[in-house]
Amino acid sequence: MSANTFGKIFRLTTFGESHGKAVGGVIDGCPAGLLIDLDFVQQQLNRRRPGQSGITTPRSEADEVEFLSGIFEGAATGAPIAFMIRNTDARSQDYEHFKDVYRPSHADFTWDKKYGLNDWRGGGRSSARETAARVAGGSVAQLLLSQSGIIVQAYVSQVGKVKLEGNYTSHNLDDRYNNPVRCPDAETTRNIMEHLEEIRLAGDTTGGVIDCVIRNLPAGLGEPVFDKLQAGLAKAMLSIGAAKGFEYGEGFAAASMLGSEHNDLFKGSDEKLLTPATNHAGGILGGISTGADVFFRVAFKPVATIMKDQITADKSGNPIILEGKGRHDVCVVPRAVPVVEAMAALVIADHLLRNRTSKL
């Protein structure tokens, strides 16, 4: 299976580089008859695209998606759905001074060692530009999930040292896209904006955390032993370029809890269905969904390109002073929110279709 393809039944293959003609993808395994809301797909791309606010890179890409196949009269035909997003504002000349340098904390060095060359124009295939194709493909997956009432909502819970108090139950997540930070709390948003401005003026960058919740998920999704639901989500999230950590449920906090504190006791309901009374497990037991909300967190590193001089070495090993140039985000986390939603939707859509073969 190609490393550029994600999923087993609902599959997304992406292509393209940061400074190539376009990025895009092919969705295979989408059930025929699914209505494709093009406005929704474009809306999600607009939420990810650069140049949308003062805290993102000023690279101005419209990110208008063009669907090339697999849709007829507004619905999926069952054939591969191909799409393309053209690059219209790439400035390769901004990167010429990186031509003979391995940029600190970028993939230039490792890609060169693996392939014998690397595209120095904005990082090529390793650029965050590739995630536009993920958002387009994941948006179609979200449309599929909506048929079953499944909702995926991600939001920023931390930027640098500024943290949002509470969890997804404490805030109205419908408000998360009403500000450029993608945080559902107004006061925390103001604090983050001030923090980011201080970092920008200092010529530096920072990281952060995105929380995500998947609601209305039926019990029984997940493929033990090696394709557990949390394993699929972890792979999806850690495949995002700047992601450095993943936890679900109580995550690392569970290591300091007692079993009597962490156990989710079952209770009956009026419908005589068993449900966990608490949800320390994050909606997953034994790699299979319990029917409770699935929630997880993803940590992102600081943007590697900073507007400060750095002492490093060129490809020949000679010491040089690397000047920070180009157009970059101070923090990638706000633009990564729709990427996290898209990747989560791809995982759940795939498991939803796979689960239909698990029993008669």
Image (cartoon, grey):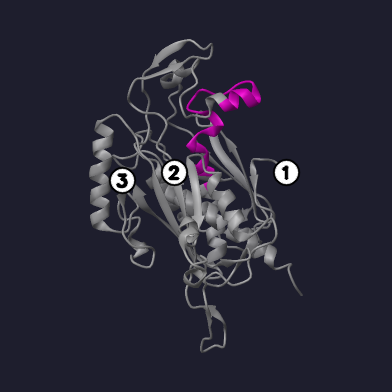
Q: Residue at x 44, y 47 (%)?
A: 299
The reply to whether residue 20 is visible in this rendering is no
Mark 3 or mark 1, which has the lower sequence index? 1
**Vertically, is 90 above or below 49?**
above
Q: Amino acid at mark 3?
A: Lys
The x and y percentages for residue 261 are: 47, 70
Mark 2 or mark 1, which has the lower sequence index? 1
Q: Residue at x 62, y 23 (%)?
A: 113
The kind of secondary structure element at disc 1 is loop
SS majority, magenta: helix
Q: Is residue 120 magenta?
A: yes
The image quadrant that residue 357 belongs to is bottom right
Identify the magenta region. Answer: 110-134
Mark 2 or mark 3, which has the lower sequence index? 3
- Foreground mark, 3 or 1? 3
Which numbered dot is residue 300? 2
- Residue at label 1? 1
- Residue at label 3? 161
- Foreground mark, 2 or 3? 3
